[in-house]
Image: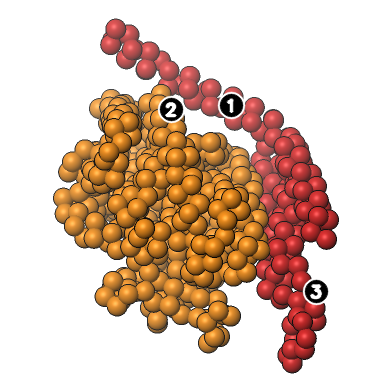
Amino acid sequence: MTALALALLIPWAAGLLLVLADGRLRIVGWLAVAALAANLAALVVLTVTVLDDGPVRVVTGDWPAGVGITLRADALGVLFALLSTVALLAAVVHEVLDGVRERVFPGMVVLLAAGLTGTFLTGDLFNFYVFFELSMTASYVLATYGGRRRELGAALVFTTVNLLGTFVFVLSVAGVYHITGSLDMAMIGERMRDVDPDTGILVAAGFFVAFSVKLGLFPFHFWLPTVYVGSRPAVAAILSGGLANIGAYGVLRFGGEMLPRELELAAIAMIVVGCASILYGGLLAVSRRTTPEMLAYSAIGQVGYILVAIGIGGPVGFAAAILYAVINALNKTLLFLTARMRGALVGAAFVVGALSVAGVPPAGGFIGKVQLFHAAAGAPALIALIFLGGLLSFVYVFQIYQYDFWRGERRGRRSGWPQQAVVAVLALAVLAAGVWPEPLLALSRDAARALPGAGG
Amino acid sequence: MKLVFALAIAILFGTGAYLLLHRDLVRVVLGIVVISQASVLTLIAASLSRGHAAIYPLTGRISDPLSQAMALTAIVIGLAVTALLLVLILRAVVAYRTQELDEIAEEEAAREEESERALAPEHEDEEAAAR
């Protein structure tokens, strides 16, 4: 319980103080790193507790259950909280080593960590919206980071589109409250069982649109390339490795726990959207010639796999979706951070990330793909499509590798060793996930079991 | 009553969406504001109930305080985000010297083309060699 409170308090308090300080000073940057590391430590303790003793549930302010806002940590929530914090930590260390350019950067990242942790650890629907908005607001500011025209243009698009997504989300929250009369996620899940799915599907569609905008799925992706290409590597890593997790988590949590019957109804539609995303992202990524552009379109393609796995559903499908979301976030953090670097370790790290995106052993992406095939067993068309998607990603990552590292199209000074060490550590993590996948597999199965919708 | 609310929400949302599609950046912000009002109104409409205020001691029927709390929170968040968006637009106007989205997009496209052209000769060599 203390760990749960600390995981929310540390980044929130530290973020508030750090926003006041001048982030361009090295010491402030390292303080932000320390705050994120402390948050990570609290989350690790929380994860161990959750895995050993089951979910932790706290009603804030000592209100009786059902009145106060509930915070709850289950395997799914802590896994995503851990993942996002790791991505944020890596990006901040990378940027601090390079020299922070704007005073609010470290504080905003720590506040983003507070928002993300809260989003993943809350058990209350409206509270989810508040934390969600907190993380979005921090990321609107982060999208302007760098302050040149290009970042501003990207941030403008990002903010407008995502605000619209958020308001659609609020509309659905109001709908759920109207139908069930409750804001507690577990209770909503129980009461939704008696609701006619025809009513529920409208609400579910609103949530789906809101989360798809965050994820950057195919019909809702239009803001994504501008933003990921326009912003600095560290910010792109934060957005794709940290913030995009909200989308994957949201579809899993809302579909798997609160609206399982609606998810079943929409399964075919989700698989179709996922497949469209895989093909669209893959084909456009092949046609791109710079690393950030390729990565942006690849991000659109990769989230398609997550959606396909959720559409397949059941314990196997959900576990595959969770595993793929984790590995995809690590890949994207790693690759976006290497996007403008040069050096011996950078090439090696890029290859590891590239192998992982393409799903070639021994990198982590291979395990993700295997789980996907496992989930899709029995649907030959789907297996063929996943295979085709993998083929496309193989072509686009190695084409970029060729341009960038064999012909030396990356110019500028060589990155410092500490910065290279950061990406090397991330690359080792991706490799470890592929070579020794048991812990991650077990964790994703536990997380899938936390969703009542997976049981049936 | 529900019909009145539903109509009001629909009109607000439609107006907001129309404004959002404008070229002028200030109108885009206005569109967002109007849409946020539509969502606040939906929160209120989601639990319309008549009765006394929910203050202790509770007497008779009380109206649902939760939807009002949610609406208040949503209004505050909407205000903060609108302020942020306005600052963002101010910075964009200063940087691009225009508040028309078209002109910003045009300038972006021109710069994109330039960077493509800078990359092109090398790729042409490569493609020629491959052939």
Tell me, for residue B109, which label it has, or none: 1
Using a 10 Å C-alpha cutoff, classify the residue at mark 1 as few (fewer than 14 neighbours), some (14 to 19) or many (20 or more): few
Quarter of the image with the C terminus of chain A is bottom left
For residue A100, above or below residue A34: above
For residue A317, above or below residue A406: below
Are both tags, 3 and 1, on one chain?
A: yes
**Tag 2, which secondary structure?**
helix
Callout 2–callout 1 Cβ contact below 8 Å:
no
Report in which chain the residue with disc 3 lies: B
Residue type at mark 3: give it.
Answer: Arg
Question: Among the chains, which one is red?
Answer: B
Please give the name of the residue rendered at 63% of the width and 62% of the height, measured from the top-left corner.
Answer: A179
Residue type at mark 1: give it.
Answer: Ala
Callout 2–callout 3 Cβ contact below 8 Å:
no
Tell me, for residue B50, which label it has, or none: 3
Report in which chain the residue with disc 1 lies: B
The residue closer to the viewer here, A82 or A202, is A202
Q: Is residue A101 visible?
A: no
Disc nearest the viewer among 3 and 1: 3
Q: CA distance from mark 2 to mark 3?
A: 55 Å
User: Image check: A147 left or right of B129?
Assistant: right
Callout 3–callout 1 Cβ contact below 8 Å:
no
Please give the name of the residue rendered at 80% of the width and 81% of the height, measured from the top-left corner.
Answer: B52
Quarter of the image with the N terminus of chain A is bottom left
Tell me, for residue A232, which label it has, or none: none
Name the residue that disc number 2 marks. Answer: A284
Of callouts 3 and 1, which one flags the residue occurring earlier in the amino acid sequence? 3
Question: Among the chains, which one is orange?
Answer: A
Residue type at mark 2: give it.
Answer: Leu
Using a 10 Å C-alpha cutoff, classify the residue at mark 3 as few (fewer than 14 neighbours), some (14 to 19) or many (20 or more): few
**Tag 3, which secondary structure?**
loop
